[in-house]
Image (cartoon, grey):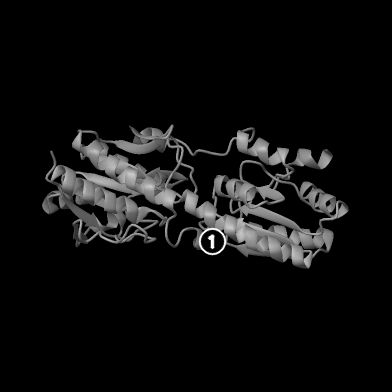
Amino acid sequence: MYKQIGVLTGGGDAPGLNAVIRAVVRTAVNEYGMKVIGIEDSFEGILGETRTVQLTPKTVSGILPKGGTILGTRNRGSFVKMVDGVPVFPEMPISEALANLDILGIEALIVLGGEGTLAIAEQFDKRGFPVIGVPKTIDNDLAATELTFGFMTAIDIATEALDRLHTTAASHDRVMILEVMGRHTGWIALHAGLAGSADIILIPEIPFSFDSVIKKVKEREANGSRFTNIVVAEGAKEVGGGEMYLDAKHTRLGGVGDYVRRKIEELTEKETRCVVLGHLQRGGSPNAFDRMLGTSFGACAVRALAEGESGKMVAFQASTIVTVPISEAVANLKTVPIDGQLVRTARDIGISFASPAESDM
């Protein structure tokens, strides 16, 4: 049994991170008699002059409903470099981190993060250091788990925004566009679009054509609905086009919503507005489901370590928490099935995905 474990958070923040941290601490201390060290600023906190904090049931009291992470997080760091689009893990920072973990008396790690953070965690396991991963991404695009905490809260935020835009669109006979997160997958856009009564949903998995977009707008006009609501994932692509970026280095996605707005105004002369929801989807208090899921993940992660597991990630499958190899979880992204139930349901009720085929129907 481990005497002392560490916990860290990496990647973008997500509602529910503090719920996981709280569950890790309470389970480790109360159930297994372990001490818990919180590592600040993701893996960077165990390089150079280490940045850590002792976590106890008292120090995590009251953090369950709080957004963000009390430990801080980083999207980029010293542990992975991209070479020709392929992640490479330099040996030096990992060796230094392992030496520092030994000095700190940390015998195992619980790592909260998405595919990038968990890929780093896997490198520690390969070098014999015990690690359990906890899936974290509001995009819900991690393989091997049906749901990730933060996703349901992000859907709630996006749906409420769409509800509010709906009334403005109807009042002014406008086309209203809501751009939501979803770099490579359209889970947030699809769920929020269904829940918020969107007329058009644009997602990365289904390249769109403006012929189909305009056809849907004009069909609604002909049927007496002089407004249209569109949800677009930030990674949505026009047929024959690529992702849109906000900077010349091609590191920050964004701008597709405004691009769609300009084209619709140009092609229809209808007043069109775009709202970019951005980090509002990440911030604030987690909803009840994400608090429960995060709590279950945290408790089960400690239990997995106590039972001798390593190199595993806790996952939600068939309404229960299981462990799966981290390698399986980060092998590929979980994308929206273009012929799956949710897409079929959306099309059944008249929602357009603006695929080229739809312009010919």
User: In x, y percent, where is residue 115?
Assistant: 41, 44
Look at the picture and state if 48 lies above or below 353: below
User: In x, y percent, where is residue 288?
Assistant: 42, 52
- The residue positioned 20% from the left and 60% from the top of the image is 58
User: In x, y percent, where is residue 322?
Assistant: 34, 33
Look at the picture and state if 33 lies above or below 169: above
**Residue 172, can we see it?**
yes
**Residue 359 in the figure: left or right of residue 352:** right
Which quadrant is the C terminus positioned in? top right
User: In x, y percent, where is residue 8?
Assistant: 28, 53
341 and 107: which one is in front? Answer: 341
> Callout 1, which amino acid?
Gly
**Residue 255, can we see it?**
no
Task: Name the residue at the front extreme.
Answer: 288
253 and 234: which one is in front? Answer: 234
SS at badge 1: helix
Q: Quadrant of residue 303?
A: top left
**Residue 54 in the figure: left or right of residue 295:** left
329 and 341: which one is in front? Answer: 341
Residue located beneath label 1 in the image: 278
Pointer 1: residues within 10 angstroms few (<14), some, or many (20+)?
A: some
- The residue positioned 29% from the left and 40% from the top of the image is 300
Please give the count of numbered marks on the rendered protein. 1
109 and 22: which one is in front? Answer: 22
- The residue positioned 70% from the left and 63% from the top of the image is 167
